[in-house]
């Protein structure tokens, strides 16, 4: 009941004309950048971070959340029509969606993706509404040791479990943590890793890192791989309305996708790739038309993963808002936006900033409705964006990258740092390192250090504090298991095949 | 991101030098972090909670991963075959890098818009556009719109130059 009252107050905030406009702006912008390959929500929100100096926090977060949700909708359009996933979370959608488009059913694929995203996004938002207060009650019992151990779990899962290689994932993470450590240590006032540069005393700006990795690195990578061939855009044919049969084949995958996506997204592990693959696999097993998978394109293979993707995107917001624990690059950058307002996300946020939190959650419901309208009747508009020629698109991205970094400081040193990070990002893309752990490590690393030192101060420097507290010990054991489990499994499997 | 082939150390082929070099480079970075951590001032009183402990842990983590990568690199690397086979388009990379270089070189003397136009044309050329004049026109309109849009909306100053002042920035 308390939750419903709080949500009601949240709608009063979100439905103000001004905030509705921010939501519309965010969802439109989000859909556009979701459609464009090469531009993602993390990069877009990073470029828009300076807005936090101009508008109230509620407006900024309604805008950012709209971009985040919108990118998930827009990404599927690109996957279906171009076979190049617009977002990493929509890789699976391309498998069946593009095949459906090739066999003349692009309209139905887009419709089931958009409606499925709406259904699952709304279920996921309901999940946030009712799960967040529960997590908050639980998290209020956390001390510094528990927080540190929880962050270790998140570190391990986002870098070692979800990617293709634990070694490269953890290397990215440690690199990010190091970037986060650069600058003045807030507890002792000591400069760390500044190499005598005054520009580094305030630390490396997250905008520089995110834009370097996601804009400069990505552009260099796409340029280097121009020989790999271009995909053609499949013209939008067929009615956007689904037939009776398509409806009846879609609704169960939507619900199953949401049921798979939300819990996985809400765990302090995050990531939308695992739930979309799981959902795809489930639908393939359960489908009455298995012959359509991989041939003409099965609608279940679009409906399920799209729902899973949006539900997990909603789920990611639970640890972000309640624990201050970002499990994706976009969430990490949103966390840095909170920091720029001097707000610390975490259990206390729900007490100290109820209008902000519940206004944001309420705006997520509104964003889903807006996105359904933006992505179904207006889909033709976004398809036109896909026709922007790559030379102009990538040149434009680099102009925006300049604005985003040079604009914050007018410092040539920042631009050079941007290019250096861009070069690192290029190597990372080329040699299959995940980039999200860099951003997560950079934002979460200093917070983890803070909790670590608090815990160690309380325990008078006794390392045992992390294993003698039962909850902290459990979390660390989970992290160790997540790290060692896949390795042991691989070893045992190799022994069997050998 | 691209869909990935399942990870495996199956290939015990010839050493893959790019991967080995990346591992060695990262090992160098870990060494640098370790060395620079020693330079952080700290009193013995703070030994276990001071500003050095986390950097040391980070250096250890980086070093361990770097060693694992060197081993993987010497055993044949981790790149899937199809990724190895794509020839890198160095010409395109060259023009993108040239664009970035001229941007940083020109942004102070000439201002944001002029530097952006030069970068835009070079990058578009790298991506295969063969209409430099059209690109320059698009770039001029685009970067002016971005300049005034951002300057107004976000209140950020992006380095006004000759062109911007002519238009009254």
Image (tube, coloured by chain):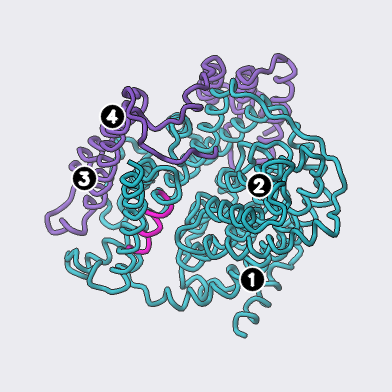
Q: Nearer the viewer, mark 1 or mark 3?
A: 1
Q: Please check the rendered image and state whether residue A406 is part of the magenta-colored stretch, yes or no.
A: no
Instruction: Identify which residue, B110 or B67, lies in the foreground.
Output: B67
Query: Residues in magenta?
Result: A148-159
Q: In the picture provided, is A309 more to the left or to the right than A454?
A: right
Q: Please check the rendered image and state whether residue A157 is part of the magenta-colored stretch, yes or no.
A: yes
Which residue does the numbered mark 1 point to in the structure image? A126
Q: Nearer the viewer, mark 3 or mark 4?
A: 4
Of the numbered discs 3 and 4, the one sitting upstream in the chain is: 4
- Secondary structure, mark 2, is helix
Percent x, y of residue A68: 62, 53
Instruction: Identify which residue, A73 or A164, lies in the foreground.
Output: A164
Q: What residue do we see at 72% from left, 52% from top?
A: A289
- Is mark 1 in CB contact (under 8 Å) with mark 4? no
- Is mark 1 in CB contact (under 8 Å) with mark 3? no
Which residue does the numbered mark 3 point to in the structure image? B40
Q: Main secondary structure of the magenta part?
A: helix
> CA–CA distance between discs 3 and 4?
25 Å
- Secondary structure, mark 3, is loop
Q: Nearer the viewer, mark 3 or mark 2?
A: 2
Which residue does the numbered mark 2 point to in the structure image? A93
Which residue does the numbered mark 4 point to in the structure image? B24
Instruction: Check the picture and name the quadrant holding the C terminus of chain A.
Output: top left
The colour applied to the residues of chain A in this rendering is cyan
The colour applied to the residues of chain B in this rendering is purple
Of the numbered discs 1 and 2, the one sitting upstream in the chain is: 2
Instruction: State which quadrant residue A484 falls in.
Output: bottom left
Res A161 visible: yes
- Secondary structure, mark 4, is helix
């Amino acid at each position: 009941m308390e939750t419903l009252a709080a949500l009601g107050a949240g709608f009063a905030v979100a439905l103000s004309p001004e905030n509705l406009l921010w939501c519309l702006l965010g969802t439109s912008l989000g859909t556009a950048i979701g459609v464009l390959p090469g531009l993602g929500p993390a990069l877009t929100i990073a470029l828009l971070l300076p807005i936090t100096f101009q508008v109230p926090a509620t407006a900024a977060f309604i805008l950012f959340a709209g971009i985040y949700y919108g990118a998930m909708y827009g990404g599927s359009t690109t996957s279906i029509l171009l076979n190049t996933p617009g977002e990493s979370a929509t890789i699976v959608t391309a498998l069946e969606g593009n095949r459906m488009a090739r066999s003349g059913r692009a309209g139905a694929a887009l419709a089931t993706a958009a409606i499925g995203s709406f259904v699952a996004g709304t279920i996921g938002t309901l999940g946030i509404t009712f799960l967040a207060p529960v997590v908050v009650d639980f998290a209020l019992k956390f001390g510094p040791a528990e927080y540190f151990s929880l962050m270790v779990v998140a570190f391990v899962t986002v870098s070692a479990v979800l990617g293709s290689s634990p070694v490269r994932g953890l290397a990215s993470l440690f690199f990010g943590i190091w970037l986060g450590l650069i600058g003045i240590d807030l507890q002792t006032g000591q400069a760390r890793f500044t190499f005598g540069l005054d520009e580094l005393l305030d630390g490396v700006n997250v905008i520089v890192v995110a834009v370097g990795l996601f804009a400069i690195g990505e552009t260099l990578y796409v340029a280097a791989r121009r020989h790999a061939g271009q995909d053609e855009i499949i013209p939008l044919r067929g009615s956007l309305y689904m037939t009776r049969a398509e409806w009846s084949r879609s609704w169960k995958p939507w619900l199953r996708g949401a049921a798979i996506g939300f819990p996985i997204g809400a765990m302090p592990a995050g990531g939308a790739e695992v739930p979309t693959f799981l959902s795809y696999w489930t639908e393939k097993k359960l489908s009455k038309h298995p012959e359509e998978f991989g041939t003409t394109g099965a609608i279940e293979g679009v409906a399920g993963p799209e729902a899973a993707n949006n539900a997990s995107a909603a789920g990611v917001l639970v640890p972000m808002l309640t624990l201050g624990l970002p499990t994706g690059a976009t969430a990490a950058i949103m966390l840095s936006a909170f920091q720029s307002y001097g707000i610390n996300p975490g259990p206390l946020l729900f007490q100290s900033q109820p209008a902000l939190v519940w206004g944001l959650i309420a705006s997520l419901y509104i964003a889903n409705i807006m996105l359904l309208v933006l992505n179904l009747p207006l889909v033709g508009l976004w398809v036109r964006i896909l026709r922007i020629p790559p030379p102009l698109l990538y040149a434009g991205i680099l102009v925006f990258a300049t604005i985003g970094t040079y604009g914050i400081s007018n410092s040539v040193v920042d631009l050079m740092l941007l290019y250096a990070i861009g070069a690192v990002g290029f190597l990372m893309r080329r040699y299959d390192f995940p980039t999200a752990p860099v951003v997560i490590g950079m934002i979460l690393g200093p917070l983890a250090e803070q909790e670590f030192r608090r815990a160690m101060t309380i325990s008078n420097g006794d390392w045992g504090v992390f294993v003698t507290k039962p909850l902290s010990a459990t979390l660390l054991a989970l992290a160790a298991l997540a790290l060692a489990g896949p390795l042991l499994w691989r070893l045992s499997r190799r022994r069997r095949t050998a | 991101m691209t869909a990935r082939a399942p990870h495996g150390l199956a290939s015990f082929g010839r050493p893959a030098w790019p991967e080995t070099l990346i591992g060695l480079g990262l090992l160098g970075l870990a060494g640098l972090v370790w060395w620079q951590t020693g330079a952080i001032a700290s009193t013995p009183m703070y030994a276990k909670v001071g500003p050095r402990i986390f950097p040391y842990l980070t250096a250890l983590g980086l070093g361990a991963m770097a060693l694992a990568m060197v081993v993987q690199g010497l055993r044949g690397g981790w790149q899937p075959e199809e990724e190895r086979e794509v020839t890198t388009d160095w010409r395109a990379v060259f023009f993108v890098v040239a664009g970035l270089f001229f941007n940083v070189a020109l942004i102070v003397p000439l201002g944001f818009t002029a530097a952006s136009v030069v970068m835009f044309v070079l990058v578009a050329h790298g991506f295969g556009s063969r209409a430099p004049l059209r690109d320059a026109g698009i770039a001029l309109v685009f970067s002016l719109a971005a300049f005034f849009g951002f300057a107004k909306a976000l209140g950020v100053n992006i380095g006004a130059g000759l062109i911007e002042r002519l238009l009254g920035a």
